[in-house]
Amino acid sequence: MTLFLEIFLAAFRAVAKLFIMCAFGAFARRKNLLGKELTKNLSSLNGTIFLPCLLVTSIGASVTLEKLKKLWLLPVAACFNVVCGYVFGRVLVFSSGGGNRNADRRWMTNNVCETPERFQRAALASCTFGNALALPVVVSVAIAETGKVGNLVFTEEDKDKCVLYIGVYLIALSPLMWIVGPSLHKPPKTFSSHQQKKATTSRKAKESDGNLHLQNASNDLEEETIDNFNEDFDEYDDDEDLPEGDVELQRLTPPSSPKSSNGRFKSSNNQGFGKGSDGGSELNDENNNDNGVTTIGATTTTTTTTSPLPITTTTLRRNPSSFERLSTTISESYRKSKQVVKGFVNVNMCASISGLILGIIPFTRHLFFDTEGALYFVYRALYSMGQAAVPQVLVIIGATLANGPDHSFAPKRTAVGVLSVRFLLLPLVHVGVYFLFKKLNSSALPSTSGTDHTFWLIFLIEGCTPTASNMVLQTMMYSKEPEKAAAGVASLLFWQYLSAPFLLTGFICLFLSII
């Protein structure tokens, strides 16, 4: 009973600290100090500046190549945790028909928790990624500070180990969170791209509507003429016989004449012989006026035109050179590659990889992270900036929850589903994996006999954490409806943190008893 009370108080203090920081955000929203637009801008600022500084400093200062070799299981556990959360989320809060716009509307919410389509991606991301930094650090350090917990004895060195193990865990989780996370929030582009292509095609069709109708109207008149016309051009192959840079005169609509009543063609430029002033024969060009009156010499006759003459459209097409073709191909490939890379590469992922590289290389580690390093002041500046990341995220959460949980985007059943994934299914899976490792008792793994209890405590705690606060930030940055979706994710966090002192405490008691 005493052990349970100690752990319960430690977890309660940690969660209460987070709630107090969120309360400042709610207060700012209530007093109109932090409006919706300002909240969104603050999220972008945090994700672009403060959070990358936190990732670079926390990862770079805690990782070395030697430690990474011994603690290989923690990055693997981070990947395993993400995969399990994603699988459970797909079953509970996501329907496979959600991205198909032609599917039945009932299929749009056809999942266990009846999550609406507009919130399914945010809910899936909330199941996938947990709070691997702030809450585990506070809880694990609070446990280590108790000294003796049951049969386990913690020392001052164990507090530093807790931070180190969590930092190694973040080596894999942080890149995953900022590579996979944005793609989970963004809707599929298949349908939107298809609609955009249709809109472009429709617009082009409207622009050339006049030409299309004229061509369709003159099809019957041109059937016989176009066959004869094409015979003269059959011997030419469009681009192959043209030297580079030459200009080809391309006739899109061959000239033709209207048919007469007996099916024969009349000439569109008739010439007649009229009597001149000297009584001789004179060749006169036909002149037509708007009233259909034809003047031939001194004689005026009236003709009736049964159908209009087809309009001949002529365009100039230049055969591109090999260099121009190569430039066009390279430009198009670069544009497509840029679109693909933009969806996966972001500043936070680059910050995580940069911290990993700076910490592993001995020269850069000494240069930046040792107190005697020439650029140690740069590390301290980035460290100070990074300390503002977590408070800002909590203030943003508090601002979005100023009016209480918003269940318009996040139904209560969805909140229960995400809560079950983070505080029930994943902890049980990690306990099962721990017993599997304990049975294997491999030398490649840290000892399960109690000598490495801090390592296994972090391993188990990382499997029992609420949704990452950064999911609110990512929702604000990448969601189609950022403000409403962020309020929905914050509602999920609200109920998780509200239940954390009870559920998290219960599982921590279980963890300490089995290790």
Image (cartoon, rainbow, N blue to C red):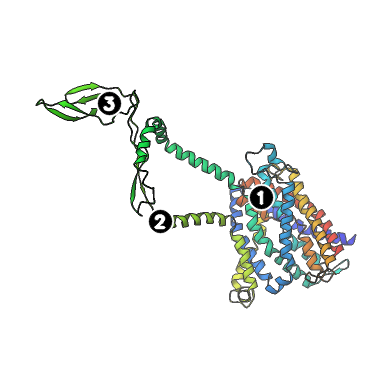
Q: Residue placed farthest to the right in the image?
A: 1
Give the spatial CA distance, label 1 vs label 3. Answer: 74 Å
Quadrant in which the C terminus is drawn: bottom right
Residue type pointed to by label 2: Glu
Mark-to-mark CA distance, 2 and 3 = 48 Å
Q: Nearer the viewer, residue 394 or 348?
A: 348
Side of 143 where 34 appears, left or right: left
Image quadrant for the N terminus? bottom right
**Residue 280, horizontal then vertical, whole percent:** 11, 27
Q: Secondary structure at mark 1?
A: helix
Look at 80% across and 61% down and name the residue there. Answer: 433
Question: Does label 1 or label 3 sit earlier along the sequence?
Answer: 3
Q: Quadrant of the rendered structure where residue 406 is? A: top right
Residue type pointed to by label 3: Asp
Is residue 30 shown to the viewer in this render? no
Residue type beneath disc 1: Ala
The percent coordinates of residue 195 (x first, y second) are 55, 42
Sequence-first tag of 2 and 3: 3
- Please name the residue that numbered disc 1 is placed on: 399
Q: Earlier in the sequence, mark 1 or mark 2?
A: 2
Q: Which residue is mark 2?
A: 324
* Mark in front: 1 vs 3: 3
Residue 252 placement, left or right of 112: left
Direction bottom: furthest residue: 372
Relative to residue 215, is residue 385 drawn left or right? Answer: right
Instruction: Give residue 424's position: percent from left, percent from top.
Output: 80, 53
Q: Is residue 407 above or below residue 434?
A: above
Q: Nearer the viewer, mark 1 or mark 2?
A: 2
Please tell me how crowded label 1 is: few (under 14), some (14-19), or many (20+) other residues with Cα within 10 Å. Answer: many
Residue tagged 3: 290
